[in-house]
Image (spheres, rainbow, N blue to C red):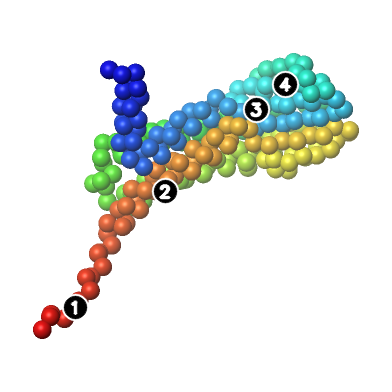
């Protein structure tokens, strides 16, 4: 068998998934990837020193650069009494953010399970026999869980971060502020952006069978009547 044959067979199986299952499958993969990536980041620039903290499920990874050159990387759990930044934050550092992100990642897991269940239903052809109302319910469940997973950190993290920082207000999921000669900036982490793409794909994959069912309910347009030829 030629070396390219396995790849062709694999590509043929992927194409055979059809758009709904293909979108759901990609969404599942991306949600898995988002679980391994930080959902939020906080940066500090003071003179020639720059600190970038990435907030993941259980820990904060802080990378320090001096004059643009890497100096060190520190990984601290949210229960640590040390601060990941050279600034007098309350101790233990970022426990409230850790709690908010733990819930956010848990919602990602729930979304992963929901997408996997829907993918399984569509794989056994159950969607072809489901009534339109049932497909609508499935779509609403996927959309509701997906939006909750996507927007929960946007709502919860800023307030939690303000509680942990204590010295200034973090008034959004992304933004910046100048405090005591240092410029602080914060933004969604790579995991959140990956999750955004997963939410879009998962929603599309769940909506397509419902749209197909709706279109099947519409009666065909009547043929144009023409008088018989004399």
Position of the N terminus by quadrant: top left
Looking at the image, which residue is at 31% across and 23% down?
5
- Helix, strand or loop at mark 4: strand
Position of the C terminus by quadrant: bottom left
Q: CA distance from mark 4 to mark 3?
A: 12 Å
Q: CA distance from mark 2 to mark 4?
A: 41 Å
Whether residue 85 can be seen here: no
For disc 1, the marked residue is 226
Q: CA distance from mark 1 to mark 2?
A: 45 Å
Question: Looking at this view, is 208 or 168 the one in front?
Answer: 208
Residue 86 sits in quarter = top right
Return the disc, 2 or 4, that comes first in the chain's sequence.
4
- Expressed as whole percent of the image width and height from the top left, the position of residue 140 reads 42, 48
Residues at marks 1 and 2 touching, judged by CB atoms closer than 8 Å = no
For disc 4, the marked residue is 63
Whether residue 53 can be seen here: yes
Q: Which mark is residue 55?
A: 3
Looking at the image, which residue is at 45% across and 36% down?
27
Q: CA distance from mark 1 to mark 3?
A: 70 Å
Closer to viewer: mark 4 or mark 3: 4
Q: CA distance from mark 4 to mark 1?
A: 77 Å
Relative to 45, residue 69 above or below: above
- Helix, strand or loop at mark 2: helix
In the rendered structure, the answer to whether residue 222 lies left or right of residue 40 reads left
For disc 2, the marked residue is 140
- Expressed as whole percent of the image width and height from the top left, the position of residue 72 reads 74, 15
Return the disc, 4 or 1, that comes first in the chain's sequence.
4
């Amino acid at each position: 068998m030629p070396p390219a044959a396995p790849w062709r067979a694999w590509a043929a199986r992927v194409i055979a998934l059809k758009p709904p299952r293909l979108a759901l499958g990609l969404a599942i993969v991306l949600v898995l990837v988002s679980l391994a990536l930080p959902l939020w980041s906080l940066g500090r620039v003071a003179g020639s020193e720059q600190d970038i903290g990435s907030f993941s499920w259980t820990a904060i990874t802080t990378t320090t650069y001096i004059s643009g050159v890497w100096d060190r990387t520190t990984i601290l759990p949210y229960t640590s009494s040390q601060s990941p930044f050279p600034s007098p934050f309350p101790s233990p550092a970022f426990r409230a953010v850790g709690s908010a992100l733990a819930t956010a990642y848990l919602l990602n897991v729930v979304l992963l399970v929901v997408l996997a269940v829907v993918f399984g239903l569509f794989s056994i052809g159950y969607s072809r026999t489901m009534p339109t109302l049932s497909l609508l319910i499935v779509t609403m469940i996927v959309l509701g869980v997906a939006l909750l997973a996507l927007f929960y950190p946007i709502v919860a993290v800023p307030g939690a971060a303000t509680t942990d920082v204590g010295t200034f207000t973090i008034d959004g999921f992304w933004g910046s502020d100048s405090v005591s000669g240092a410029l602080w900036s914060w933004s969604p982490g790579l995991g959140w952006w990956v999750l955004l793409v997963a939410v879009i794909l998962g929603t599309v994959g769940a909506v397509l069978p419902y749209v197909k069912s709706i279109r099947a309910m519409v009666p065909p347009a009547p043929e144009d009547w023409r008088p018989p030829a004399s």
